[in-house]
Image: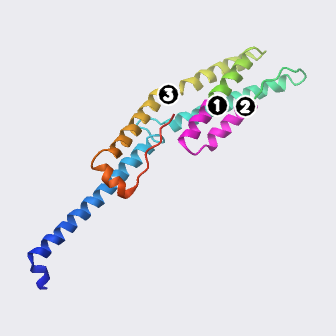
Amino acid sequence: MKLLRKKAFAISAMAIMIIAGIMYGSYFSISRAHHGAEQAFYRGEYCSIQDDLNRRMEYAQDMVYIAKQYNKQQADTHQQADVEPTQAAIDRLRHAKTLSEKYDADLDLENAMTDLYISLQGTNLKDSNERDAKSLYESFQLYKDNYLIEGYNNGAVAFNNQLEEFPTNLFNAIYHFDKVELYQ
């Protein structure tokens, strides 16, 4: 018990507790910032990029449905709308895991959807289907929200820059947090 009364021990114990508190606090602070930067993609403040991608897939799937209805009407002719690229792009986006895979799959979906819409414009669609196709394509384009993407990327860049600044870089050398992937 005499050890607890010594000044040197008390100073050492206090220093160890302060260092442990700093290490513990810095880990959770960086971890929370990292998680927040990543989750902005999935859960934005008002809406998210993932929500927009889900809506774009829904609109593309509806456009594929219209094209298939047209193909049934034109079964006896050789004039068919090619739905395979759009369906493949939807499936690729649905199964994409990383942000870069999602970005590339969304670009493929954009091109396939545009091609499908253009191919349907020169056909003999029913008036209601023609209006629906136009509305779906416009809605599809509406959910290509560059403002959300720019906001997410700015947040990711800010976090990545913070990882390189003092004193975060010292703690990151210990904890090894990965940089947040940009959506591009």
Checking the image for residue 22, the label placed there is none
Residue at which label 2 appears: 85
Seen at 8% across and 75% down, the residue is: 7
Q: Nearer the viewer, residue 120 or 103?
A: 103
Mark 1 vs 3: CB contact within 8 A: no
The percent coordinates of residue 125 (x first, y second) are 76, 17
- Inspect the magenta stretch and tell me whether residue 106 lies in it: yes
Residue type at mark 2: give it.
Pro
- Quick one: label 1 or label 3, which is nearer the N terminus? 1
Mark 3 vs 2: CB contact within 8 A: no
Residue at which label 3 appears: 145
Seen at 91% across and 22% down, the residue is: 76
Q: CA distance from mark 2 to mark 1?
A: 9 Å
Q: CA distance from mark 1 to mark 3?
A: 16 Å
Residue type at mark 1: give it.
Asp
Checking the image for residue 108, the label placed there is 1
The percent coordinates of residue 170 (x first, y second) are 31, 53
- Main secondary structure type of the part rendered in magenta: helix
Task: Say which of marks 1 and 3 sits in front.
Answer: 1
Seen at 31% across and 49% down, the residue is: 168
Q: Residues within 10 Å of mark 2 (few under 14, many from 20)?
A: some
Task: Say which of marks 3 and 2 sits in front.
Answer: 2
Seen at 62% across and 38% down, the residue is: 93
- Quick one: label 3 or label 2, which is nearer the N terminus? 2
Residue type at mark 3: give it.
Asp
- Quick one: label 2 or label 1, which is nearer the N terminus? 2
Q: Nearer the viewer, residue 75 or 149?
A: 149
Secondary structure under the numbered disc 3 in the rendered image: loop
Magenta region: which residues? 84-108
